[in-house]
Image (cartoon, helix red, strand yellow):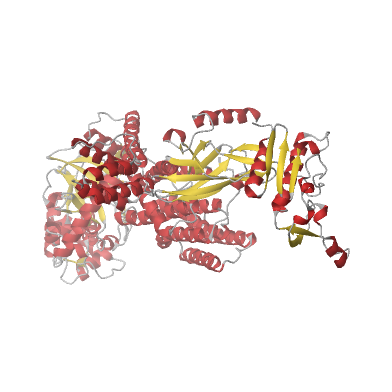
Amino acid sequence: MAKSKPQAVTPSQTWWLLAAALSALLPLTPHVPYWLSALALTLLGGRAVLNRTQRRLPARFWLILLTFAGSAGVLAQFRTLFGQNPGVALLVLFLALKPLETRTRRDGLAVIFLCYFLVLAQFFFAQSIATAAMTVATIVAVTAALGSLADGRARPADLLRRSGLMLLQAAPFMLLLFVLFPRVQGPLWGLPRDAFSALTGLSDSMAPGSISNLSQSDAIAFRAKFSETPPRDLLYWRGPVLTEFDGRTWRPEGRLALPRLAYAPQGPLIEYEVTLEAHAKRWLFALELPGNLPSDSLMTGDYQLLARTPVTTRLRYSVTSHTAMAAGREESSAVLQRALALPGDFNPRTRALGQGWRDQDKTDEAVLEAATRFFLTQGLSYSLTPPLLGRHGVDEFLFESRQGFCEHFSGAFVFALRAAGLPARVVTGYQGGETNPFDGYFTVRQYDAHAWAEVWLKDRGWTRIDPTALSVPSRISQNLAAAVPAGSPLPLLTRADLAWLRELRLRFDAVANTWNQWVIGYNPERQREFLNRLGMRAPDWRQMTATLAVLAGLVLLGLTAWALRQRRRVDAAQRAWLRLGRRLGRRGLPRTPWEAPLAYADRIAVRFPESAAEIRAISALYGRVRYGNLDPVLLDELKTRIARFQP
Amino acid sequence: MRLTAAVQERFIRWALRVHPPEPAPVVLTQRRVYVLPTRAGIGYAASLVVMLLGAMNYNLSLGYALTFLLAGLGVTAILHTFRNLAYISLAPGRTEPVFAGDSARFTLLLHNMRSDERRQIRLHLAGGMPATAEMVDVAARSSAAVRLGVAATERGWLALPRVTLDTIWPLGLIRAWAYAAPDARCLVYPRPANATVPPPPASGGRSGGAANMPAGSEDFLALRGHQLADPPRHVAWKTAARLGADAPLMTKQYADPAAETVWLDWDALPAAMPAEERLSWLTRWVLDAHAAGLSWGLRLPGAQLAPAGGEVQLHACLRRLALHGKE
């Protein structure tokens, strides 16, 4: 259809393209290598100078050279050109280079489309409300630039206004499509390995310092929605179970995971729904011990819930828990053997301590009792900044520094019990959390990360013992802040003296959670659930598409009516004039259809001499309004004068 | 190729919805405005598909939102582009006559009854090159005049070819277009014969009106540059003799043009001459007579214009020549 030859871009269109490119590039600068950001901004600046001075664009040779040099840089940085991060870096490079060879409108369109792609790329790094707001500004600017390509003479303010208006009108379509477009659970093809490299959370091993690092972060680990929040001392969110110890680091056993529970649940039932933040690992968190498997999950022999694939997006699952621990009474000897293993010549004093307990008391319960008593009376204190420990870390903690974080407590406890011949293992996860009063969601943050111990007793199976709770009960009964000495560097949210900040943060969290639940977390399941609530029974893609079509059609109809609303106003003058005729008709002086306005006015003037001047003025005004350029001010004047005309 | 051209022609005739030419003003109602994506629009849609796949693969909820917002923008663009053209009204304006071989300039008045400006409306004529298209903005509740050039090849009435109005405003993704055939025509005078044609024969029967005039009654007014059609009797031979052979000839002008009356006669031309050529010669003579400030009469088969001078006579004669045998 478009059969014109390529049109050159004008300087003002080039300014628009540069502004669009800048607005798309700036938000990405923290996420691409710094040299690339600098290069991109320099290239755009260079193009701006060329545009200002109206000098010729560089020869193709230089652009090819820059493209290869930039790509080589990306390759050197990421060791590959494929994948999410190198892909974004390459797009940034291309968007910075493209304006330097943009001569025609068609090139300009390529710049615009690249800008839209880079807006999408921003969502790889963040999908918060702030990101969304920032992208809206970018989209308005890019769309205005697209408009400038079609209308080179338009004023910038008009382009921005038009772009804003059109996007506003596009919003209802976006809303409908967002809610009703049948969602597909990704990924459609394999994700690159670097897709989720920037996530924090528990790691799958525990060494001194690994959990206390997390205690500085108030990032949210997951949220739970309870019908009734259980007491705090039951809030043990089970995560990785660590059995193997090499003298310094605790690691999980490689256990087979099966799609069924590894025990018969007992005790009171708690039902809740967890919204887990992406952490790029497979484990799911649930209160000890889970009573069912959430969909698409497995359970290991040491009672860890695992997703089938790493949790790379926010994940929602329903789960139940039974707070009475009753599992593993008939544990295999191989498992117990591994739960007793101690590495060679580490921590001789603790080994001796354990041996001593065993020598004194023959029963497991008595040994456990002795261990518990030891932890209660040893005068251990809780610290976010424990001193560095050497080769015999457990010995140094228990007998010298006596300061530690939960990983020290649990590690030492399990070590001592193993030395006493009791099978034990470390369990990591989260403990506690708090209810956000603004939306009722129970929120667990990274600083709630915790480690405790699990002991196997012949009659009771695996039993939870929290050595931290023994030594520092306030860590469990209250929170982290209550457990550490005053003046420790704490995350802001745990500090009691900043109540207003806390409240602000909780409010913000509630909003962010709503956003996460309903916008970011709007996946196939939530879509089904939401449409169900709206009254669609068993919504499938056919029903969704049909509803979508009908509703989008209605919106389109409304907008079309807006688009074509017009013209009636042109004849407003005539309507006013006819009204005057009808009114005077009731007084015996009707307007005849063939009568020209001036002639009619003359007739009125003869009949009502005292109003002659006014009616002549009105009829002259009518002529101007009706047959001249339509001026709304004059039209209004005409209407009021006709309404007021009472001869 | 010929088939698609025929199909296209049929579509256009159907799309016009009325038999051309249409009485003025031509209002482009919504049923006459068509929309299709431009190449840029197709590229835009393709980009959106890629973005949707990306959003699906990476489970980017905001990616979905972005794609859907841009899809909505595309739909809105259809409406805005459509609205930019719909209900514009089109009336032919004054068109000056031209000579065959020149370009007829048709004036069209676009009237915008809406209180929003209409921007970037492009007009071009059927068969015209796109390069000749005119771009125009029409301010709110006002009119704009557009001139469209058509090559005038033949004398007589030249009807305005079918006009295509189109616009890709505001985003360039969608093209809206409409056809109109307003009732406008341009009078095309015959192409004047070469300036080297001999002057009308003064001896042509009763034609040499000047011969009846007493020679002394002419009041000499001034000298002006000689034109080939000037009667030889008016050449200032004395001046020429004084200035030498290389100097241009001068023509004497007389104060009373009516004194110099010529008859330009169809039959004065050689009998073997074809009609169009005769008209061409007569046109040249009429122009020259007017330029010389003469008074002249025109005699055509079945028509005669009494001798007179000036613009009115000029255009009356040219019109008669243009329409000779065509009415």
Residue placed most toward the observer, A378 or A440: A440
**Left or right placement of residue B96 versus residue B235 in this view:** left
Residue placed most toward the observer, A248 or A499: A499
Quadrant into which the N terminus of chain B falls: top right
Q: Residue A4, can we see it?
A: no
Q: Residue A316: image x %, image y %?
A: 27, 43
Q: Residue A320: image x %, image y %?
A: 19, 40
Q: Residue furthest bottom?
A: A487
Q: Residue A446: image x %, image y %?
A: 25, 57
**Left or right placement of residue B115 versus residue B157 in this view:** left
Quadrant into which the C terminus of chain B falls: top right
**Left or right placement of residue A372 versus residue A184 in this view:** left
Q: Residue B115: image x %, image y %?
A: 36, 48
Residue placed most toward the observer, B250 or B101: B250
Q: How many marks?
A: 0
Residue A230 vs A27, above or below: the answer is: above
Residue placed most toward the observer, A300 or A33: A33
Q: Residue B100, can we see it?
A: yes
